[in-house]
Image: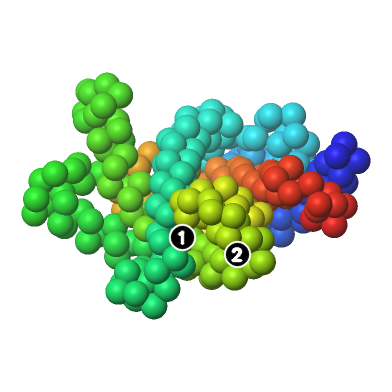
Amino acid sequence: MVRYLFNRLGQSAVLLIGVSIIGFALMHLAPGGPLAVYTLNPTVTAQDIERVKHQFGLDQPVYVQYFKWAGGLVTGQWGYSFFGGRPVSAIVLERLPATFELMGSSLLLALIIGVAIGMLAAVRRNSILDYATATAAMIALSLPTFWFGLLGIFVFAQTLGWLPAGGIETTGGGGFADRMWHLVLPMLVLAFVLVAQWSRYTRSTMLEILGQDYMRTARAKGLRPARVLLAHGLRAALVPLVTLAGLQLPLLVGGALVTETVFSWPGMGLLFVNALGTRDYPVLMAILMVGALVVVLGNLLADVIVALIDPRIKLGHV
């Protein structure tokens, strides 16, 4: 286990280095470079641009800038925002809890509802329930996330007035209950597409498992159908389902970006959109690396959980 973890951590480190190099290069290859917001402003003089370049170290060779930035990233010195001059690490850490709150609650909700619907659809194959869930899943996968967000705001916030239209809490602060009330709509929107994928994947996995010999043997022994389904079927389905959870992390991160923008949820996604609009490259690079780290560690955690669930799987071949 220890050797496997060290090997995977080494691979993850190489992957993150590659992401950082590509991201850093793209930032500098973009029209206008990191200082495009200044160079494209006709009121900014050449002297002002040179002063800003020297202040942020952008007058040095690109490889020198990269190594300085990478060294600061490792030591926690992520640089300073081009707008306001605040430390990037402080800006990102302020937004992380809100993003993790939204992503974590959406993933948990999607797991519970998606697995339950998928199991019911598999047990009642070719029934009205099966066809209805398949149709709903196709609709959810065919339409963009932001459309569901706008539809949710129109129906539940504007028309019915049941839920807040956006934000993380009422102005002035409303306590834990108020924060959870603001979480409901963005959580449901972000979880909707994930539920569609989880339900269809669970259904196909359970259909294969229900036809296995050990499932027929368990039923022949007189075990209750619910126990056969949960104790034997669901346990066997956990391995591919956990693997799917790791693979869906990029989708979850991307969905959070769109959802946060639609609902003005003050997390990393909204911060990314704002930084992109102002071309605040230090903030953009920090968000890129944090997102890559979450995806890499999430996949590593999924592999370890799979190995713990099914001891027959050799860690070296996960």
Q: Front-most of 29 and 168?
A: 168
Mark on residue 216? 2
Q: Front-most of 294 and 62?
A: 294
For the N terminus, give its image quadrant. Answer: top right
Q: CA distance from mark 2 to mark 1?
A: 17 Å
Name above or below for residue 89 compared with residue 137: above
Q: For residue 53, what is the image quadrant?
A: top right
Residue name at image x 25 percent, y 44 percent: 166
For the C terminus, give its image quadrant. Answer: bottom right
Count of marks overlaid on the render:
2
Check disc 2 and give the amino acid type: Arg
Q: Earlier in the sequence, mark 2 or mark 1?
A: 1
Mark on residue 119? 1
| Label 2 Cα crowd, 10 Å radius (few <14 / some 14-19 / many 20+) | few
Q: Can residue 180 be seen here?
A: yes
Q: Position of residue 316 (x, y in %)?
A: 87, 52
Residue name at image x 23 percent, y 23 percent: 174
Q: Position of residue 161 (x, y in %)?
A: 10, 46
Q: Position of residue 199 (x, y in %)?
A: 45, 63
Residue name at image x 68 percent, y 30 percent: 77
Q: Position of residue 164 (x, y in %)?
A: 19, 42
Name above or below for residue 255 compared with residue 127: above
- From the viewer's perspective, is 231 left or right of 199? right
Q: Can residue 36 be seen here?
A: no
Q: Secondary structure at mark 2?
A: helix
Residue name at image x 37 percent, y 62 percent: 145
